[in-house]
Every structure is written in structure tokens, then in C-alpha cells.
Image (cartoon, rainbow, N blue to C red):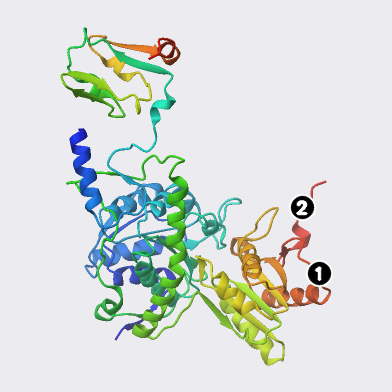
Amino acid sequence: MQKLVQQRLKKLEAMPKLIGPVSVKVSDVPTGTWRYRRPVIRHGDCVKCGICAEYCPCGVIEKTEGKMVIDYTYCKGCGICTTECPKKAIDFVLESECNKEGD
Amino acid sequence: MGVIKALDGNAAIAHGVMRSKVQLVAAYPITPQTPIVETIASLIDKKEYEATYITAESEHSALSAIIGAASTGVRTFTASASHGLALMHELTGTCSASRLPAVMAVVSRAIPGPMALWCDHSDIMTQRDQGWIQLFAKSPQEALDFTMIAYRVSEDERVLTPTMVDIDGFYCSHLTERVDVPSEEEAEKFIGDFKVVNAHLDTDMPYAMNNLTSPGIFTEIKRSQDLGMRAASGVLDERFEEFGNVFGRRYSRIICDDVEDAETVVVCMGSMSGTAKHVVKQLRASGKKVGVCRIVAFRPFPSRELSGVLRGVRNVAVIDRVSAMGSFGPLYEEVLAAMNYGRIGANAYSFVAGLGGRDIWEQTIEDVIAKAEELGARGETCQAPIWIDLKEEKVVYNA
């Protein structure tokens, strides 16, 4: 995914002129700041089926280096992945709790 | 050579669309615009004109289809009025901010309420700050010509801003006049093919258009859009000139009659300008120093040009075909801004007339001029708009 985005960005840069709001990845707004609960994957229970990534409405979950990774810069904390996970391996933790632990 | 046809404003626009080689039309019918899309559908059906025609389920969908199609790099057209234009409101901003050069015909009809079918400018004025170039035609011939000019201006890479071509409902839309319809070859000398100069959707490189934009860049995108709109002034001048050279019909962003040495000048837009011109000619013949200035391009507004015309004038009478409740009409406010731009200290008076299809007669214009002269002679300022064609006895005053 990252590679694809990079490829497209390169292609976009090569275009002569672009005016108006256009992007290959919606990255201008750090929507993660809207989150008050955070999905946290318990990697020991995760079977890497990828269903969380399929259901994520923002496309911020990716399988990287053999494990599922959530991009917290853009994850709004809707919690859909925590509901859809067949192994119930994603906890939905209050941001205030995460901050307490210095996360 | 073109063909002379008897066409009403709506049919003239349909022919303008055909001659502009528009590739996709998406629309939903609404009085008084319906005959435009009916004529286009009929021309396509008779194989006189080849284009994709989408019958949308609403105006919101029609403009959405236009935005989608324009994003893939085709020349597009839609048309609406009143309620329909209101339903498009959300998308008119999307279209212009995405810098898509679409063209829309607006056949002005009062926006509710009360519910009406007839003309005033309350519908198009809801769109004045939505980032569309707005051209006001007064006759079927102008409606056809402005449609063709609109494509060339909107698609110019300095502009990339959509255009609304406005005609007055029934006064122009259903008025049959002699219209010179350019032949395909003749039109080709002016119109050319649509060339994509900005981003367009490509399956090989998918990307989002009009995506979520942060406070960090929103202002700059709006300013870029404003610069495109401002550049349209010069581009309109160029295209009016080129159009005149090809077809012999000359236009400009403001069209003035008898304004040299005039003491009182009427400023107006749309179909009432013909009546105003006629009245001014008659008053001139009786020795009165009056003139008329018609605004053709309401957006971008020709402030500099107008202030040049109004220099030395004693009274300026602005007629808005829309009521601005609690304030002044939009055209009046533009004229005041233009006068401030040129440091012009003339008396300016705001008039409201012709709402919901009330006819603007010669008498109405005469009343406007007389009132402006009377107030001007007394040196009075304009404290509120003057409802010049009001039936005072029918007005209900709150207890």
C-alpha cells in the first residue's frame, strides 16, 4: 500500500499542473486526533486474517512485516474492527487510559 | 454561414450546447428550463447531435453526474432553475472548488416562497458566491452566444471555473426571436475541442478529488479559486473580442447606452435592460441626460469598468430583480463597492422591481429614473431599497 501511494505520488508530481483539492491519500487532516477510544491488537491472539483491514472504513489497517498494524495518525476510533474481529483480539481502550500508561 | 431560425431562449441555448460540441448532458426538468433539455434530447434523438444524455432523478444527481463526467475529461452541460438550482447548491461549490469547467444554464425563476413559476433573480443570487462565473443574457441570440463563449472561458487554463449562463424565465426563455445559429463549420472556428488541462480521473492512477481539507490549506485553495475567477475578467474580454471577430456580434462585460454626459444612469441586468434602453432613448429624445448600464458579467464583477462609466454621473439608480430583506439588493451592493473602488461620490439609490414575474414596463423604468432624480435633487441618501412597483394598498403591516 505504502509503495503504491509512493508510486502514485511520483506520477502525480510528474503531471504538469494540478489545481484544486486532489490527493492520492487523504493525509491532510490527522483524523486520529478525533479519537477517544483506541483499538489495540493483542498480537498473541491475532491470526492475521485481515478482516479488520477489510472492514476499516478509513483504510488505516495494514499487514506489515507479518503483523496487523493500525495507523493511529488517521484511525478515528470508530471501533468497527473490534466488533468484526473473529478472534475478539482487538481491545477498545479509552484514550485517557492509554495516556495514563504513557502510551 | 449560419442559419437564421426562429428560436426562443431555451431552444437557443440548446443549439448553443450542440454547437459547443458538448459530450455529456445530465439534467432534470423544471419550469421554465424544461424546453432546454427537451430540445437537447430531441436533437440527439433526431441524430442531429451526438452526445450522451443522462436523465437524472433529481437536480442534485444531475450536477453530481456532471461533476463525475467533467472529472474524466469531457465537455458537460446541465440546466436548472429555482427549486432545482437550490437542490444543486451543495454541488455547485464542489464543482467550482474542484476547478471543473462545466457550463450550466439558469433560467431564472423566483425561489420560494411564496411558490411561484415566474421570473426574478432570487434563484441565481443564491449562487453568487459559489465560485461560478455568471453571465446574464437578455435575448435568445445572446443566450446561444454566451453558452459558446462560456465553454471557452471556463476551460481556459488561467480560469478553470464553471459558468452559469442566466436568462430570465419566460421573458427570454419563452420569447421567440430571430436567432443566427452558426453552422458546424462556422462554430468550429471558435469552439475547438475540449482539452483537459487540469487533473482528470484515470483508472491507472486513482485519486480523490475534493477530499477532506484541513484548516492548514483550505484558505489557500479558496484563494487560488478566487484568482482563477479574477483571471476570468481578462479572458472574457479576449473571448468576447474573438467571438466578435468570428461571428460579428460584439459583447463586453458591461454594455452601456447613452452614458456619455449622462446625469442619471440606470444599472440593471437581464431582460429588463431592453426596456431600460428603450426608455432611455425616448428620454434622451426629449432632452433628458439619462443613460443605462447593463451588467453582463455579474461574476467576476466588472468593478473597474463600471466605476469608469459612472465617473461624473450625478445619480445612479440600481434595479435589483430580487428583494434583499433587511438590507440592500446584491447588485446595488456591487455597484456601491465599484463606486468606492473608483472614489465616485454620486448619489446611489437601490430599487426593487419585477419580483415573481411582475412585468417591468416602460413606466417602471421611468418611475425609477424620476425617483432617483427627485431624491438626488434633494441630496437624500438611500436609507432603504425603494420598492418601485409596489401596490401599497395590498401590503400588510404588522400591528
Quadrant in which the N terminus of chain B is drawn = bottom left
Mark 2 belongs to which amino acid? Val
Mark 1 belongs to which amino acid? Glu
Is disc 2 in contact with disc 1, using a CB cutoff of under 8 Å?
no
Residue identifier under label 1: B380
Residue identifier under label 2: B396
Q: Report whether residue B106 is seen.
A: no
Q: CA distance from mark 2 to mark 1?
A: 27 Å
Q: Residues within 10 Å of mark 1 (few under 14, many from 20)?
A: few
Which is more N-terminal, label 1 or label 2? 1
Give how far across and how far down residue B224 sits, in percent: 43, 55
Residue B216 vs residue B352, the one in the foreground: B216
Assign a secondary structure to mark 1: loop
Give how far across and how far down residue B18 sits, in percent: 30, 69
Residue B225 vs residue B146, the one in the foreground: B225
Q: Which residue is depicted at the point 21% across and 11% down? A: A46
- The quadrant holding residue B163 is bottom left
Q: Pinpoint the chain carrying mark 1.
A: B
Give how far across and how far down residue B122 sits, in percent: 57, 58
